[in-house]
Image (tube, rainbow, N blue to C red):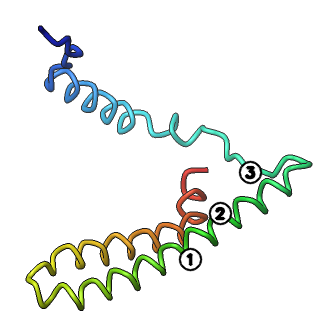
C-alpha cells in the first residue's frame, strides 16, 4: 500500500519569495507606511462575549497555577526515583501557560 504525500515546495522557491518581498519593502517603504492606522472597537452587544473570555482566561490561569503546584510536588517526589526531567518539563509548561494567559491581551494588541 502506498501513501500519498503532499507535494513539497522547493526551499529555493521560498527563499526567492522572501528575498523578493524584503526587497520590495526596502525599495518602497512609503507603500508600507501608506497602510491605514486602524483603531478597532468592540461591536455593540458583545459585552457578554468579553465577559466569557475573561472567565476563560481566569480559568486558564487557575489551571496553570494548579499544574505548577502539581509539577513542583511531582518534582519533589521524582527526585528520589531519578525521574526529575518529567517534573521539570511540567514546571516549564505550566510557567509558559501562565505567561501566555496573562499576556494574551498584550500579544493580541500587537497584531491588531
The residue shown at (70%, 66%) is: 54
Residue labelled with disc 1: 62
Work out which residue is located at the far left of the displayed protein and give it.
82
Question: Percent from the top left, x then y, of residue 36?
Answer: 67, 41
Which label lies toward us, 3 or 2?
A: 2
Left/right of residue 55 with respect to residue 8 in the rendered view? right
What is the C-alpha distance between the residues marked 3 and 1?
Answer: 32 Å
Question: Percent from the top left, x then y, of residue 82?
Answer: 8, 82
Which of the two discs, 2 and 1, labels the residue nearer the N terminus?
A: 2
Q: Considering depth in this image, is 45 or 58 the residue closer to the camera?
A: 58
Tell me the number on the disc at residue 56: 2
Query: Quarter of the image containing the N terminus?
Result: top left
Left/right of residue 65 with respect to residue 50 in the rendered view? left
Tell me the number on the disc at residue 39: 3
The residue shown at (15%, 26%) is: 11
Work out which residue is located at the far right of the displayed protein and give it.
45
Image vertical order of residue 28 relative to residue 107, above or below:
above
Image vertical order of residue 80 relative to residue 22, above or below:
below
**Toward which corner of the image does residue 21 lie, by quadrant?**
top left
Which of the two discs, 3 and 1, labels the residue nearer the N terminus?
A: 3
Amino acid at each position: 500500500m502506498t501513501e500519498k504525500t503532499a507535494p513539497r515546495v522547493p526551499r529555493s522557491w521560498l527563499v526567492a519569495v522572501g528575498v523578493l518581498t524584503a526587497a520590495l519593502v526596502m525599495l518602497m517603504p512609503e507603500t508600507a507606511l501608506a497602510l491605514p492606522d486602524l483603531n478597532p472597537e468592540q461591536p455593540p452587544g458583545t459585552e457578554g462575549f468579553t465577559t466569557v473570555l475573561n472567565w476563560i482566561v481566569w480559568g486558564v490561569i487557575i489551571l496553570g497555577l494548579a499544574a505548577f503546584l502539581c509539577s513542583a510536588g511531582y518534582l519533589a517526589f521524582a527526585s528520589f526515583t531519578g525521574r526529575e526531567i518529567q517534573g521539570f518539563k511540567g514546571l516549564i509548561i505550566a510557567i509558559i501557560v501562565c505567561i501566555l494567559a496573562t499576556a494574551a491581551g498584550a500579544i493580541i494588541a500587537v497584531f491588531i
